[in-house]
Image (cartoon, grey):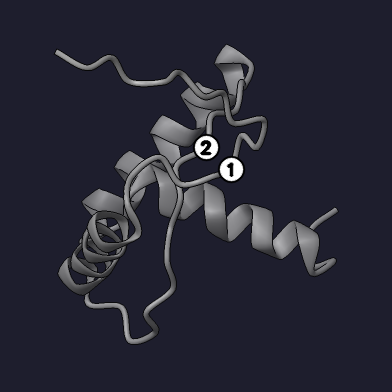
Amino acid sequence: MARRKLTIDTNPFAKTEPASVQSSKDTSMLAEKGASIQVPKRAATFYFASTTLEALEAAWLAARQRGEKVSKSELVERALEAWLQGEAF
C-alpha cells in the first residue's frame, strides 16, 4: 500500500476539502437557511470567555423564542460585521 506524503499547510484559513466538496457543502448550507446571496462560509475557531458564551446562549434562546431561525454562528457573524463597520462600540 502506498503511503501518502504528509504536507503541512501554514494557512489556517485554507480549505480542508477539495473545492467541489467544499462548495457544495457551502451552498447547500446557505440554501437551507434561505439566504438570497450565496457567500461561501469557512469554519474557524475562536476562544471566548465563559460569560460571553453564556450571553450568546441567552441571546440565541431569546431569538428562538421570538420565532427567529438563527444560529449562534449567525449571531456572532452579525455582531462582528457590525463592529467591523463601526456600528458597535
Label 2: element kind? loop
Q: Quadrant of residue 83?
A: bottom right
Q: Nearer the viewer, mark 2 or mark 1?
A: 1
Label 1: element kind? loop
> Is the Cβ of the residue at disc 2 closer than 8 Å to that at disc 1?
yes
Q: Residues within 10 Å of mark 1 (few under 14, many from 20)?
A: few
Q: CA distance from mark 2 to mark 1?
A: 7 Å
Residue at 52% x, 37% y: name it. Answer: 44
The amino acid at mark 2 is Ala
Left or right of 24: which side holds 52? Answer: right
Check residue 83 in the rendering and tell me which mark sits there, or answer none: none
Residue at 56% x, 13% y: name it. Answer: 50
Whether residue 59 is situated above or below residue 53 in the rendered picture:
below
Whether residue 73 is situated above or below residue 83 in the rendered picture:
above
Image quadrant containing the N terminus: top left
Residue under label 1, please give it.
13
Left or right of 64: which side holds 58? Answer: right
Left or right of 74: which side holds 69? Answer: left
Residue at 32% x, 51% y: name it. Answer: 18
- Which x, y percent locates residue 66? 26, 58
Mark 1 or mark 2, which is nearer the start of the sequence? Answer: 1
Along the line of sight, the residue nearer the viewer: 43 or 2: 2
Along the line of sight, the residue nearer the viewer: 27 or 55: 27
Check residue 44 in the rendering and tell me which mark sits there, or answer none: 2
The amino acid at mark 1 is Phe
Q: Residues within 10 Å of mark 2 (few under 14, many from 20)?
A: few
- Which x, y percent locates residue 51? 59, 18
Whether residue 14 is situated above or below residue 47 in the rendered picture:
below
Residue at 70% x, 64% y: name it. Answer: 82
Along the line of sight, the residue nearer the viewer: 81 or 7: 7
